[in-house]
Image: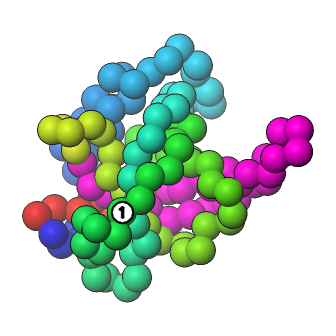
């Protein structure tokens, strides 16, 4: 796979993301085009321009998805700024790159988690 940077005219990328949003919508609409996307997806640290092997991907719980990005929860703040992201369900998967743009602390009773908001930065292609 190689990293390609999205262009505003990359219609296929946005159609793929839109398809994922409409497939997984749960009726919880948030700020504009952001949709609830509460499911498990896989991410892997992206170091430099080297695409991580599939074995490096691990599961995270996604919270929402929009054409510009997504968010996920984790038990500790993310260790990396850039990630490769696998979206969808087999056999329909798309691979993108994303950058963590904010991290918020979530407290529920005695449990502390973190919500990482990410912006899509590119698309991975084979």
Q: Residue at x 28, y 29 (%)?
A: 19
SS at badge 1: loop
In the rendered image of this protein, does residue 20 appear above or below residue 55? above
Residue 17 horizontal side relative to residue 101, left or right: left
Residue 38 horizontal side relative to residue 55, left or right: right
Residue 27 horizontal side relative to residue 123, left or right: right
In the rendered image of this protein, does residue 125 appear above or below residue 65? below
Residue 7 horizontal side relative to residue 70, left or right: left
> Is most of the magenta stretch helix, strand or loop?
strand
In the rendered image of this protein, does residue 22 appear above or below residue 93? above
Q: Nearer the viewer, residue 87 or 100?
A: 87
Residue 97 part of the magenta segment: yes
In the rendering, at what x and y percent does residue 74 appear?
Answer: 63, 54
In the rendering, at what x and y percent does residue 69 appear?
Answer: 48, 48
Residue 84 visible (yes or no): no
Residue 17 visible (yes or no): yes
Q: Quadrant of the C terminus?
A: bottom left
Q: Quadrant of the N terminus?
A: bottom left
Residue 38 part of the magenta segment: no
Way the structure is coloured? rainbow
The residue range painted magenta reads 94-119
Q: Nearer the viewer, residue 39 or 66?
A: 39
Name the residue carrying label 1. Answer: 57
């Amino acid at each position: 796979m190689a990293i390609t940077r999205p262009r505003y005219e990359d219609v296929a990328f946005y159609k793929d993301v839109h398809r994922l949003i409409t497939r997984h919508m749960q009726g919880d609409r948030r700020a504009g085009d952001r949709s609830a996307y509460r499911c498990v997806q896989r991410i892997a640290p992206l170091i430099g321009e080297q695409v991580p092997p599939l074995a490096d991907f691990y599961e995270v719980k996604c919270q929402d998805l929009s054409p510009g990005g997504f968010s996920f929860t984790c038990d500790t703040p993310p260790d990396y700024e850039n990630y490769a992201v696998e979206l969808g369900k087999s056999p329909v998967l798309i691979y993108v790159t994303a950058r963590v743009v904010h991290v918020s602390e979530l407290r529920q009773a005695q449990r502390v988690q973190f919500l990482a908001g990410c912006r899509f930065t590119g698309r991975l292609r084979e």
